[in-house]
Image (cartoon, grey):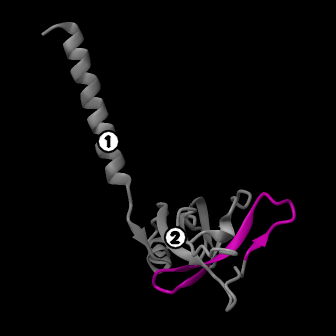
Amino acid sequence: MKKGHIIGLGIIAIAIVIIMTSIGDASSYESFTTAKEMKQDGDDKAIHVVGQLKKDASGEVTGLNVREDKVSFTFMLVDNEGVEQEVFYNEPVPADFTRSESVVVIGSYKNDEIFIADKILMKCPSKYQETEVQAAGM
């Protein structure tokens, strides 16, 4: 084989190893209960928890507390099992955060009371959702 072919095969092999490693790190969505159990077992690995922001009867987000310096905030998240948990995020509030349909927090517990998010992913309402259009004056 030529030297170029060997180098090409080496690059392909490295790429396959990197892809397989990243697939192994991809985690499924967990609950706050599972995250707390992992912390108690000494596992500080970051996990993905999906949920919705806590809202009152009128649909307004409750439990959102932005720090005075506006560079961090806490909020209440209800996971898919109905467990309500305070989450801390050490970044400013993302745009349209309160309008998101669901929120994925990636992080772990540092103590038993608060979940520390390293990253937040949001599913925002689609601007392409069907809306009722009423013909005015027709």
Q: Quadrant of residue 8?
A: top left
Q: Residue at x 67, y 92 (%)?
A: 57
Considering only vertical position in the picture, is 2 above or below 100?
above
Mark nearest the camera among 2 and 1 is: 2
From the viewer's perspective, is 70 left or right of 46?
right
> Residue 107: horizontal and vertical position, in percent?
54, 63
| Along the viewing direction, whichever of 45 and 137 lies nearer the viewer | 137
Residue at x 67%, y 84% (from the top left corner): 59
| Spot occupied by residue 37 in the image (x, y as percentages of width and height) | 45, 77
Kindly state the secondary structure of the residue where label 2 is placed: loop
**In this view, 6 is above or below 79:** above
Q: Residue at x 46, y 68 (%)?
A: 42
Q: Nearer the viewer, residue 111 or 79?
A: 79
Tell me the number on the disc at residue 19: 1
Q: Which residue is mark 2?
A: 130
**Other-residue count near label 1 (Cα within 10 Å), few / some / many at <14 / 14–19 / ≥20:** few
Q: Is residue 137 covered in magenta?
A: no
**For the magenta stretch, what is the residue range?**
64-85
Q: Is residue 137 shown left or right of residue 80?
A: right
| Distance Cα–Cα, label 2 vs label 1 | 38 Å
Name the amino acid type tagged 1. Answer: Ile
Tell me the tag on residue 94: none
